[in-house]
Image (cartoon, grey):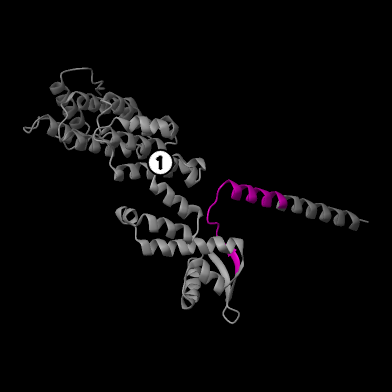
Amino acid sequence: MNVYTFMEININSQVEELRLYFNEKGAEISVERSSKGLEDDLHKIIGVCDATFNSADVQEHEVESSLNSIVSVLMVMPVSEKTESLIVAFCEKLSKAPQSRNLGTVALRVLNVLFHALPENLGMRYHIYYTMIQVSGQIGQVALVFRGVDDLKNTLRSAHPPPSTEQMQQLLRLLHQTLLANNMGLSESYPVRFLEGERIHDLLTIFVGEKLPGYLQFYSSYKEYISSIGLDHEANIRKMRLLTFLQLAEETPEMTFAYLQAQLQLKPEQVEPFIIEALKTKLVVARMDQSQKKVNVTTVAQRTFGRAQWESLRDTILTWKSNLAVVKESMRTIMTAQIP
């Protein structure tokens, strides 16, 4: 079996070698060059570059060599309108590598080569960075890519065009999901801290820890902003009422209807239906006393679960452990006393 190493050769010759290589590996690609030019050649090659991912007879270093050969073509070909679509397609293929023979490390190395080979001001490097986070997260090596907020800002600062708001939201969402593996709370995670000073961060802080009046005050100042980011004000109020109810239930297990009416800014006839809907979420277990117009909370889900909650849980477990030790010792004493 021939092992292709893809030495530095003429770009046209390299494209021909790649076509021949993947054709021999069983991929549906012709060995003949495309009449439409280099970009179409590369489009077709990228389309089948995963043909060797699941082939047991193709060693990892050979897979990596073939992928790096594609990188070398991307590096030298002129940047055009189609370049971004080629990079996106290549990244999509590499994002699936960890699911095939554990090729995540190979894919991450290839992405790293491509990312640092392209000019720093090339906006399409965003797609490569995003995929690097994806792949590194799948193999538990995100620290190799993401080193903190300042590093992220520096990485994307010179990009032209810069990432759009939607792209940044997608990246930060991905980072949050990945960093949760490190037991970091939402408000403490790097992606959220990255947004400090922005209105979206203020809004997130309200939803994480404040009550309904805090949201209404924010809305009165930034009505247009809420609409501009696609949020429904009425839906936000419903969510904040539920979150406020959970927090109130933690603080005061027994609450009157009048108290809830004032805290949640409800009409008298809306209190009972609200409580019923809240109970349906199963976030709270309570008994409603209609005659006394009270609600008695038995259990409630923690609205947030940060360091304080972990410490409380630790203390509870240690108390249980201590109590069980006392019970065990008491049982041992009883058993010993019964022996004649």
Q: Relative to 247, is 60 above or below?
A: above
Quick one: SS at disc 1? helix
Percent across and percent down for residue 45 are 19, 33
Which residue is at the front of the view, 261 or 148? 261
Q: Is residue 56 visible?
A: no
Residue span colored magenta: 297-319
- Magenta stretch encompasses residue 310: yes
Q: Residue at x 89, y 58 (%)?
A: 338
Which quadrant does the N terminus fall into?
top left
Across the whole image, how many numbered discs are drawn on residues?
A: 1
Question: Where is residue 295, by image quadrant?
Answer: bottom right
**Amino acid on which the number 1 mark rests in the picture:** Leu
Q: Is residue 237 left or right of residue 17?
A: right
Which residue is at the front of the view, 320 or 264? 264
| Disc 1 packing (10 Å; few <14; some 14–19; many ≥20) | many
Percent across and percent down for residue 276 are 49, 73
Q: Relative to 270, is 40 above or below?
A: above
Q: Is residue 296 left or right of residue 67?
A: right
Which quadrant does the C terminus fall into?
bottom right
Which residue is at the front of the view, 204 or 328? 204
Percent across and percent down for residue 175 are 40, 41
Question: Where is residue 299, by image quadrant?
Answer: bottom right
